[in-house]
């Protein structure tokens, strides 16, 4: 009966019906109390028998030897069912039953019949059967060992017992199976050390999670130690503390034993897994390290060896850069694996054994050497490509600058004025300086590129022939590009020298033309000043002589201006012949210069003649007025010259083209004529005085002469007033002449400076 016929899991529907149960209570002989609560429904004897078989399989043999006290609760059932159950106990547990207490209802069965029948069957049944009411059951069993259904104080929860029973059986089943599996796994590792693959195959995962099973066992053990599994918190009133699963049901010792065995096997299993994982991890790391090393020394190195060119243009260099970035991307994946492996190796080194540490350090050193060597090659290649891009970019920019400069030199120069030529010349010089700076930068970039190529990390000796030859080609290409740019720059410099000379000649041509036009303007201004301001003839001979000298100087200034203009125009002719262009001044400036000069010459000649006539008139008049004895011929000569001068003042200047022009305004001419007339009046007065000296005796003549004298005096007074006004006008004219002379002097200086520039 001690053999377990079934598990609670398979009998869960029957156990839930509570057809029978072990409450944990004990009789006075320390035997277990088995309670069979019969209900009003028809009870299946087969189900009850199965339930009893399961319950009686739980206690130990020692516990069963003390016998059972069976309480058959028939208060809700019929007598024949109770009788059937009692008889069935003979077949199920005849030896283990010590006493059967049938709890009867208060008024139902026939006492005599029931008592007689049980007494009659006592010898055949093998155990004593008593019929007792619920309130008298305490005569045979202590109240603390009875549940509350029979008036006792023992706490019993059938559902709680069933749940804990399920947990116990589940733990027992899983732990037993897990122990068997762990034992097989642990023992298989010792017997199969020769064949590592076979050992690895045997290292299978167990069917159950050891951690989960251990946790379940600890929780179950905790429940058992708290006396809550199929028991109470303590004994009855004054009774000793009691735990059924500790002694009678063997639950706690069994759980503890299973937990100890499970922990031992699980510890061995963990150590075994740790060793195998470490070995597996070492093998994986070794395989990955060799994989990284093989790729870097094989395909990775081959990719870099085939990429030694620097390209012949910016676009080619960019294409090489893109290809290098693809190679770097491929290497980055392997470098990431290297970083991960390095971290794994570092973690293993901190907790590894001596033999493993040596192996790991060797792997780490090999991996680091290969990765650093490959990274150095990648960095050198990247530096070369960056330097190549800078070199090709500078080459392209310098070529564009040379093309722009050459286009500027090949274009025809047709500027509008000297300022634009100066601007073009400045732009040409700036472009030439930019080209020079670009060529200097190209030499620097070329030197940097060749330096990067020379400092590139070398490959093994047996593999350096092809890269070295390609590197030599790259150096020759760089030197050829720099020499070509130097030649192009030299050709452009020669053309710039020619263009600079031509543009300077054009600047000089424009300057000569501008100065020639300025000469024409100056000569026109002198002509205008001569006609408008040079009108006065002087009041006396000394003043007229001074004005005549100033006029000669004025004419000399005009002559210098004309000569300077002629020289400038001759220089323009020479420059146009040198520049192979048609003269620009012969059609306009030269005719204007000649026309104005002819007009000036006519006016100057007329002005000089008038001044000479005025000088002769004033000289003769002054001589007549100063001498005491004057003949009539002298007086007549003065009158004749004065009238001639007055007639000359009224005549215009006739230019070679037939046009006429008067000196000054009519008022200016009238003022000059009035001065001559006044001098003629003085001469006439002198004539009258001489006549009066011949009429000594004629009083009437004397009176008339006296009146004439008075009239002459009045006229003289009028003349004196007019002379004073003319004197003021003369002072103003002298100031104007001084200004004209100052302007003429400034013009002389400008002409001399322009002559020196030419």
Image: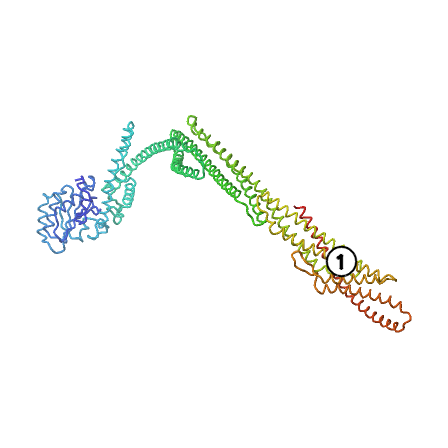
Residue situated in front as seen by the camera: 568 or 35: 568
Left/right placement of residue 675 relative to residue 584 reads right
Q: Residue furthest front?
A: 633
Residue 697 against residue 298 in the figure, above or below: below
Name the element at disc 1.
helix
With 244 as the anchor, is 93 left or right in this view? left
Which residue is at 82% across, 64% downward? Answer: 683
**Picture coordinates of residue 711, whole percent (x, y):** 83, 71
Where is residue 363? Give x, y as percent.
39, 31
Circle count: 1
Q: Which residue is mark 1?
A: 611
Q: Identify the residue shown where x is 21% and y is 40%.
A: 60
Residue farthest to the top?
462
Report which quarter residue 335 is drawn in.
top left
Up-down: is 333 above or below 111? above
**Front one among 737 and 644:** 644
Q: Tell me which corner region of the image, top left, top right, bottom left or bottom right, holds residue 354.
A: top left
Residue 529 position, x and y percent, is 69, 58
Q: Residues within 10 Å of mark 1 (few under 14, many from 20)?
A: many
Residue 226: image location, x then y, percent: 29, 46
């Amino acid at each position: 009966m001690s053999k377990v016929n079934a598990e609670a899991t398979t009998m869960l529907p029957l156990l839930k019906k509570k057809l029978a149960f072990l409450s944990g209570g004990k009789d006075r002989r320390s035997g277990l109390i088995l309670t069979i609560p019969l209900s009003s429904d028809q009870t299946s004897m087969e189900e009850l028998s199965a339930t009893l078989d399961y319950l009686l399989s739980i206690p130990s043999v020692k516990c069963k030897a003390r016998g059972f006290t069976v309480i058959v609760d028939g208060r809700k059932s019929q007598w024949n069912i109770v009788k059937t159950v009692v008889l069935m106990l003979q077949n199920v547990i005849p030896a283990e039953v010590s006493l059967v207490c049938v709890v009867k209802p208060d008024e139902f069965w026939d006492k005599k019949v029931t008592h007689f029948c049980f007494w009659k069957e006592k010898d055949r049944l093998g155990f004593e059967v008593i019929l007792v009411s619920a309130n008298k059951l305490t005569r045979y069993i202590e109240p603390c060992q009875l549940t509350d259904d029979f008036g006792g104080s023992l706490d019993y929860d059938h559902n709680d017992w069933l749940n804990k029973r399920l947990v116990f059986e589940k733990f027992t089943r899983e732990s037993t199976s897990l122990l068997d599996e762990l034992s097989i796994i642990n023992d298989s590792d010792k017997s199969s050390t020769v064949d590592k693959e076979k050992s690895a195959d045997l290292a299978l995962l167990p069917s159950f999670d050891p951690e989960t099973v251990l946790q379940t066992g600890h929780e179950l053990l905790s429940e058992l130690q708290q006396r809550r599994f199929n028991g109470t918190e303590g004994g009855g009133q004054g009774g000793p503390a009691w735990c059924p699963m500790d002694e009678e049901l063997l639950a706690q010792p069994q759980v503890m034993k299973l937990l100890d065995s499970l922990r031992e096997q699980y510890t061995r299993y963990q150590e075994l897994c740790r060793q195998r994982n470490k070995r597996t991890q070492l093998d994986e790391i070794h395989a990955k390290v060799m994989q990284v090393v093989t790729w870097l020394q094989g395909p990775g190195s081959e990719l870099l060896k085939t990429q030694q060119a620097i390209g012949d243009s910016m676009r080619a260099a960019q294409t090489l850069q893109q290809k290098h970035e693809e190679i770097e991307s491929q290497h980055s994946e392997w470098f990431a694996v290297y970083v991960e492996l390095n971290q794994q190796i570092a973690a293993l080194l901190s907790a590894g054994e001596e033999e493993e540490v040596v192996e790991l350090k060797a792997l780490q050193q090999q991996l680091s050497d290969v990765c650093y060597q490959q990274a150095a090659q990648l960095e050198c290649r990247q530096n070369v490509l960056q330097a190549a891009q800078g070199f090709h970019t500078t080459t392209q920019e310098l070529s564009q600058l040379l093309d722009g400069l050459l286009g500027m030199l090949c274009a025809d120069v047709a500027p509008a004025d000297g300022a634009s030529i100066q601007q073009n010349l400045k732009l040409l010089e700036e472009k030439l300086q930019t080209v020079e700076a670009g060529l200097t930068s190209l030499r620097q970039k070329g030197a940097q590129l060749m330096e990067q190529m020379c400092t590139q990390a070398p490959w093994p000796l047996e593999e350096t022939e092809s890269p070295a030859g390609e590197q030599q080609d790259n150096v020759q290409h760089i030197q050829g590009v720099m020499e070509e740019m130097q030649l192009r720059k030299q050709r452009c410099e020669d053309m710039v020298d020619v263009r600079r000379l031509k543009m300077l000649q054009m600047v000089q041509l424009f300057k000569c033309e501008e100065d020639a036009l300025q000469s024409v303007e100056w000569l026109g201004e002198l002509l205008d000043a001569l006609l408008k301001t040079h009108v006065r003839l002087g009041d006396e001979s000394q003043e007229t002589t001074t004005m005549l000298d100033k006029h000669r100087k004025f004419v000399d200034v005009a002559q210098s201006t004309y000569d300077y203009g002629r020289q400038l125009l001759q220089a323009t002719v020479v420059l146009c012949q040198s520049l192979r262009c048609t003269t620009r001044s012969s059609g306009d400036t030269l005719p204007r210069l000649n026309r104005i000069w002819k007009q000036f010459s006519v006016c100057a000649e007329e002005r000089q003649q008038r001044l000479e006539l005025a000088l002769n008139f004033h000289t003769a008049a002054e001589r007549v007025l100063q001498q005491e004895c004057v003949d009539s011929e002298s007086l007549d000569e003065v009158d004749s010259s004065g009238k001639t001068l007055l007639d000359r003042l009224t005549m215009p200047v006739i230019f070679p083209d037939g046009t006429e022009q008067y000196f000054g305004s009519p008022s200016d001419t009238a003022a000059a004529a009035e001065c001559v007339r006044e001098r003629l009046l003085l001469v006439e007065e002198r004539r009258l005085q001489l006549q009066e000296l011949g009429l000594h005796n004629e009083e009437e003549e004397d009176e008339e002469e006296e009146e004439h004298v008075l009239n002459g005096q009045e006229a003289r007074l009028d003349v004196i007033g007019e002379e004073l006004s003319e004197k003021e006008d003369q002072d103003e004219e002298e100031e104007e002449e001084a200004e004209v002379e100052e302007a003429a002097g400034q013009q002389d200086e400008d002409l001399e400076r322009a002559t020196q520039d030419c």
